Amino acid sequence: MQFMINLSLLAASGGWWDKVKADFALNFIQASRWKLIVSGLGVTVKVTLLAMVLGLVLGVVVAAVRSSYDLQKDEAKKNKASWVILSIFNVICKIYLTVIRGTPVVIQLLIIYFIIFAASDNGVMIASLAFGINSGAYVAEIFRSGIMSIDKGQMEAGRSLGFNYMQTMRYIIIPQAFKNVLPALANEFIALLKETSVSGYVAIQDLTRAGNIIRAKTYSAYMPLIGVAVIYLAMVMALTAGVSRLERRLRNSDH
């Protein structure tokens, strides 16, 4: 009975679909507010891609240092200078991993924006740097686990072919490790995409902040916030589909 009464009220007031269309027009069509969403989406994609590249490069370097310390420490001890250098780099990497993984990404973003680069007004680059440094710590551990999972015989086979340690890592170990860690790496990049939604803390007009700006102007929370959520969901689904396709191609290349 109550349901029928609600339907009658909706019909009398023009119907729920008319309300949805009016809400959509208010939030996105009027005053061309959709441009805020498009602009914010561009900023989000730019920050994510730059942070992804930085995190990947930084993560591979840190993983190489950490795994080299674990795999080469017995051999490095024979050369005191090499052992000292490798130990120093390993300690630096461990401190980096401990600090970055032990503090919230929002705090890191605020410190980098308001303290380290307080004189700069390039918010996009600062946010990319902050998220890239944060992501690099997780990528490093993902890659290190992948490298350590490769059978030691692969390293010995590379050395027997005349490759030095770095060449063996580059041409034999890391390509195999990449295949092993691809699912975990994809999850990290998906998490990175969603983490960029806190960029608004440093006044960067990303996708989430664009939705909040529209909400503040129209006093309507439903449409802008749901719209932003749908866009994030679509990007995550596209990224997941791309990774799945890459995994299939890598599996096919093994045959």
Image (cartoon, rainbow, N blue to C red):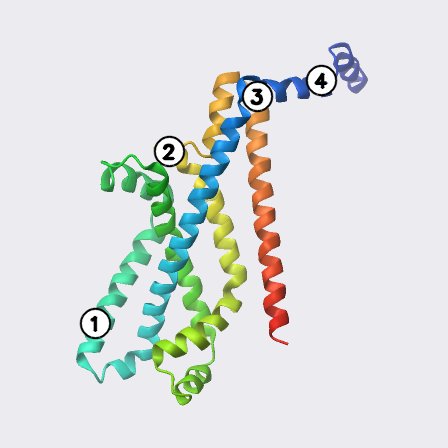
Few, some or many C-alpha atoms within 10 Å of disc 1 (few <14, some 14-19, many ≥20)?
A: few
Which one is earlier in the sequence, the residue at label 2 or at label 1?
A: 1
Q: Amino acid at mark 4?
A: Asp
Q: Which residue is mark 1?
A: 85
Task: Find residue 12 and report its image quarter.
Answer: top right
Contact (Cβ within 8 Å) of mark 2 with mark 3? no
Q: Which residue is rendered at x = 72% and y = 21% of the image?
A: 17
Q: Which residue is mark 4?
A: 18
Quadrant of image for the C terminus: bottom right
Q: With 53 as the anchor, is 33 left or right in this view?
A: right
Task: Count every numbered label the image shows and give the total.
Answer: 4
Q: Image check: 221 left or right of 113?
A: right
CA–CA distance between discs 2 and 1? Answer: 39 Å
Residue 171: give x, y in percent of width and height.
44, 75
- Nearer to us of marks 2 and 3 is 3
Residue that carries the numbered disc 3 in the rendered image: 27
